[in-house]
Amino acid sequence: MAENERLQAVFERDEPAFIPYLAAGDPDYEASKAYVEALARGGADVIELGLPFSEPIAEGPTIQNAIVRALESGMTPDRFFEFVEELDVDVPLVCMTYYNLIYQYGSEDGPRPFVEKAADVGLTGLVVPDLPAEEAGPLRAACDEFGLDLVFIVAPTTEGERLERMREQVSGYVYVQARLGTTGARDDVSDQTDESLARIDDWDVPKAVGFGIKEGEHAARIVRAGADGIIVGSALVDIVADGAKSDDSVEAVAERLERKARELKDGALAGAADSEPRPERT
Amino acid sequence: MSDTHAGKFGPYGGQYVPEALMPAIEELTDAYERYVLNNEDGFMDEFQDRLRDFGGRPIPLQYAEQLSERYDTDVYLKREDLLHGGAHKLNNALGQVLLAKYMGKERIIAETGAGQHGTATAMAAAHLDMPCEIYMGKTDINRQRPNVFRMRLNGAEVNPVTVGRGTLKEAISETMRDWATTVENTHYVIGSVVGPAPFPQMVRDFQSVISEEARHQIEEQAGRLPDSVVACAGGGSNTMGAFANFVEDDGAERSSAEKSSGDEPRDRVDLIAVEAGGSSLAVDEESGVAPNSATLSTGHEGVLHGARTKLLQDSDGQIMESHSVSAGLDYAGVGPELAHLVDEGRVTPANVDDDAALEAFHRLSQEEGIIPALETAHAFAYLHENPDAVGDVTIVNVSGRGDKDLETVIEETEKRDLDVDVDMSIFEGAM
Ligand SMILES: Cc1ncc(COP(=O)(O)O)c(C=O)c1O
């Protein structure tokens, strides 16, 4: 299985990875670039960039609205690739999108042209929430060909044979869905997180937990539970949404994002400091 | 049937859903095989008993005298509008709610467009004593109000969906989100032959009672099979239900084993799926709007709501906003099996526009004493425009009745200069 070296390097370090998400183009192209760069300054180790799709069935209202704003401001797959190329950040970027956009891209049907282009602009991996392991064969093959990681989501309901099938296909990191439902910031950390982490305790691939994380406290708690990384989307998108609503300057919103990123990253680091030394990853 | 393996129909079908739902879909596949395909614990017997006693089956196949004379062809009507609830939808809803009960689920959710599937699901859930929530787009709530009240009367909660245009596509997405949260105790009763496997084949199986009955009835009444079956298609559940038992009547030479027993070639029954042509077949890529729902004729292969199928989408793969005067046909996707049967040349896709559907609505009301659903009216508009394409004997599936559409019909008729005589004064005091 192809392992993207840049992504691998992140998890080989002896500290938990902070992985923020934003929808590319939300609320518009230029502001969005500034926001992503602010996350990098705030300590992001990997950034998940959403390529907006019109029917985001795994998304709660916060990210649905972000996607609407991004689409209305003209984001398309081609613009997205330009966006990635123009970004001035030096952390690995992972694209989060839905399968139809991957399938339709380029002149032939099938995922290969999209993956080729993604590799070409420097993306390091893909997360596709509507593509379970069963249907992932062609995309897995294209990712192997072009050296991209394909991240799978382990849900609280994933057990038994399904876990095994996923274990064979996943690379980069495994996205541990912290609770049932859709994306969205929550006020607590679900107990389902610990159960999900326990189920994949012996997997070699790094485990990043997402869905609902909102505060540094949550990040610390999840790292203490054994996560190698935390993924935060809606809590950051909320800042973008508030800024767009009150017409705040791009600089002001970027600064808020950087500060929030710092809080989450520090939370994750504090969680690591409290826990047992992390096992060597080979 | 044409499902080959693992819920695929040729290149179409499959299971493109979030991982959180996959275990529930595996559980459903297992329950479908045991209870529906193998009648475990007498599930199918109970289903058929309830369809009879609660639903009112069998449903008549009626010879339509006026239409037959007008089109110089023997027109038979499969009267699914007489099924309890007023549309074919109960065949599926009752089957799935009963299945949920056998599976030990405690809660029912469903999406609805025209409100017919929501109503049928609410009725089935009340009948089988299950709590029920329905998701419905705000545009559809406004244009199908009588059904909103019917659902509430049956004790269902109706949740408005306000994103996007607020029609069937958004309602399905929102129901999937509910399901991703509540999957452990909840069954999603999907309303058409769409979604991830096993839904397309399971919904078809529950609906195929339509053609099972119709096949016997036409043999008894006309002494032969029909030359064609005509049905409207949104997702395509009444369509697949009306076609299922005729799909193999493809006019092909029989296999050598069959031939040696001296059989003639099979009869040929043409299968015609009529979609909504809306106001135009043209699309506006810039604004992402297709002013129609003619997915089978104009769509392109892609992935939506759990299945690979034909879709109305722009060149990037963003799903378009569809349009039809009839809420139940207003959808950018279509069932994967229908898409496959069209590619194979077994099903003929057709479409008629909003005006033609409204005219057919009035014509059927005036001439046959049947007020059809606007969805159903599309099938009759096809017959009107193509009387020579249906052969000597045709069955039209009357998928539902039109009570729910009266407000829309009044409004839309007033706007237009239709080719049928409608005296608008008949509506005075109606609204
Ligand atoms: C009366 C009637 N006919 C047809 C349809 C379209 O659905 P399908 O294509 O699944 O039969 C609907 C949907 O609401 C309906 O209410």
Image (tube, coloured by chain):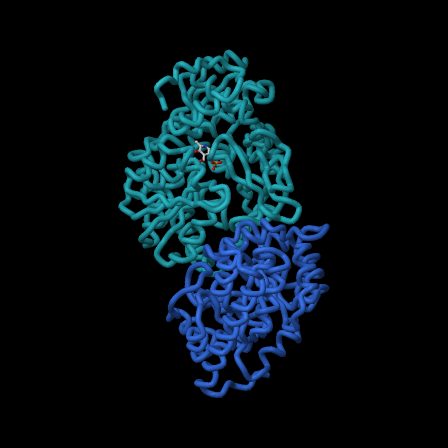
Chain colours: A blue, B cyan
Q: Point out residue B83 in the picture as x, y percentages from the top left corner.
A: 36, 30
Question: Is A5 drawn above or below residue B261 in the view shown?
Answer: below
Question: Is B237 drawn above or below residue B60 in the view shown?
Answer: below
Q: At 32% from the left edge and 50% from the top edge, which residue is drawn?
A: B101
Q: Does any portion of residue A161 appear in the rendered image?
A: no
Number of numbered discs visible in the structure rendering: 0
Q: Point out residue B385 in the picture as x, y percentages from the top left corner.
A: 58, 20
Q: Point out residue A72 in the picture as x, y percentages from the top left corner.
A: 58, 49
Placement of the C terminus of chain B among the 4 image quadrants: top left
- Viewer-proximal residue among B324 and B378: B324
Q: Point out residue B260 in the picture as x, y percentages from the top left corner.
A: 60, 34
Q: Quadrant of residue A20?
A: bottom right
Q: At 47% from the left edge and 57% from the top edge, which residue is drawn?
A: A62
Q: Does any portion of residue B12 appear in the rendered image?
A: yes
- Viewer-proximal residue among B23 and B259: B23
- Viewer-proximal residue among B419 and A47: A47
Q: Quadrant of residue B347?
A: top right
* Left or right: where B114 falls relative to A40: left
- Viewer-proximal residue among B121 and B224: B121
